[in-house]
Each structure stands twice: as structure tokens, then as C-alpha cells.
Image (tube, grey):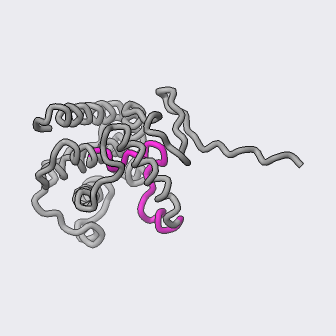
């Protein structure tokens, strides 16, 4: 009886890196791969208005903008906000209803990927409870505006699921879906600005 063929649990990235999903190493994480992948993953399973998908990369820019406007945060916290969905460059964007169907097993993979990504860029493996809650709040506000502007939700329906945002208005946010290359470029640009801000200690 032949031995079972080992299951491949790594993904080859365009940078040439091979990222092991079971044991991801920070050494195999590249910001170019993250930006490339997130710019090609659609939010809302692609069920949004516009000529282009509203990508996770663009969503991350929106969340970081909301987080920055809502909190007195340093460049490190802002970078964690920008990278809050970075594991999705590997695992994709699983919509909340589907998460409810499959259960929470994916969370362990997501948790390991988040740690590897954060450590690669000199961040704590995971955000503090307070910072995580602030990022989640910004994420929920982003979801409200994405739902009503892009995904066909009525305002009362979005309020039911996401609450009513305060202090943030739609005109503050880049919600017009953009081509993947543009979203990728803006994500990389913002990452570089925040990285420079952490190094210099100046504003981001």
C-alpha cells in the first residue's frame, strides 16, 4: 500500500515566494504580493455597482482613512488598520454569511497569517484589544457606506446590520471602484507613507 501523497499547503506568489499556509513565515511575506492580491479580490463577492470590482485593497484604504479620522493614532496603528484584511491576499474575502455556514475553522489560518504579516513589517503579531476594537469600528463604518453606495442596501437595511455612522460622511471616502492596478498602486503608496512615518517618527 503506497503512502498518502502529501497535501500541498503553500502558495507561490508572483515575487517567487512560497507561503506555507500551515506555518507562514514572515520571510515569505512581501508587500508587493499583498497589494497585488488584495487589488484583485472583490468585496461583497463582486456584487457591487461600477465598471470595476470594489477590491479589498480599496476597502483597506477606506478603513485606514476612517480610522485616521476617528482616532489619535500613530503610524504603527494606522499601518495595522491598512493591513487589517491583509491575510485575504491568500485566503480571499469570505463574506459574513458564508463564514456563518462554514464555521470558524478559517480563523486559525487567518490568525497565523496576520502574525506573519505583522512581524514581517516590524509590527506586534496582533493588535492590542483596544486597537483591534477601533479598527473593527472603522471596518463597520466602511461596510455601511459600501453597502449603501455600492452593494444595493437601503439605508434602513444597512443601519440594521452596521449601525448609523457618526462623524464620517460618504464624501470623505474614496468609494468609486477603481481598476486593480490603481488600487494596487495607492495601497503601496499609502503603505510606504506609513512606513516612512514610523521610521521618522513624524506624521503619517
Pick whichever, 186 or 157, lies toward us: 186
Tell me residue 196's x, y (percent). Answer: 20, 31
Q: Residue shown at 64%/42% (left/top)? A: 8
Q: Is residue 84 highlighted in magenta?
A: yes
Q: Quadrant of the C terminus?
A: top left
Tell me residue 149's x, y (percent). Answer: 25, 54
Q: Residue shown at 27%/72% (left/top)? A: 160
Furthest residue in direction right, as rendered: 1
In the image, taking residue 168 as reference, residue 77 lies left or right, namely right
Tell me residue 135's x, y (percent). Answer: 25, 56
Image quarter of residue 151: bottom left
Pick whichever, 44 or 92, lies toward us: 92
Pick whichever, 46 or 134, lies toward us: 134
Q: Which residues are magenta?
A: 82-102
Q: Is residue 85 above or below residue 107?
A: above
Tell me residue 121's x, y (percent). Answer: 33, 37
In the image, taking residue 22 as reference, residue 203 lies left or right, namely left
Q: Is residue 72 above or below residue 35?
A: below
Amino acid at each position: 500500500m503506497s503512502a498518502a501523497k502529501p497535501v500541498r499547503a503553500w502558495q507561490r506568489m508572483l515575487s517567487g515566494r512560497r507561503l506555507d499556509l500551515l506555518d507562514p513565515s514572515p520571510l515569505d511575506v512581501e508587500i508587493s504580493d499583498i497589494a497585488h492580491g488584495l487589488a484583485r479580490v472583490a468585496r461583497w463577492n463582486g456584487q457591487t455597482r461600477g465598471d470595476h470590482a470594489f477590491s479589498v485593497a480599496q476597502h483597506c484604504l477606506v478603513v485606514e482613512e476612517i480610522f485616521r479620522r476617528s482616532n489619535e493614532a500613530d503610524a504603527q496603528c494606522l499601518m495595522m488598520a491598512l493591513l487589517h484584511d491583509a491575510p485575504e491576499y491568500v485566503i480571499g474575502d469570505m463574506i459574513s454569511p458564508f463564514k456563518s455556514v462554514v464555521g470558524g475553522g478559517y480563523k486559525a489560518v487567518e490568525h497565523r497569517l496576520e502574525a506573519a504579516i505583522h512581524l514581517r513589517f516590524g509590527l506586534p503579531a496582533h493588535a492590542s484589544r483596544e486597537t483591534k476594537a477601533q479598527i473593527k469600528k472603522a471596518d463597520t463604518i466602511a461596510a455601511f457606506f459600501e453597502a449603501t453606495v455600492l452593494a444595493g442596501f437601503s439605508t434602513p437595511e444597512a443601519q440594521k446590520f452596521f449601525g448609523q455612522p457618526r462623524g464620517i460622511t460618504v464624501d470623505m471616502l474614496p468609494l468609486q471602484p477603481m481598476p486593480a492596478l490603481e488600487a494596487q498602486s495607492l495601497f503601496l503608496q499609502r503603505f510606504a507613507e506609513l512606513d516612512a512615518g514610523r521610521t521618522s517618527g513624524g506624521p503619517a
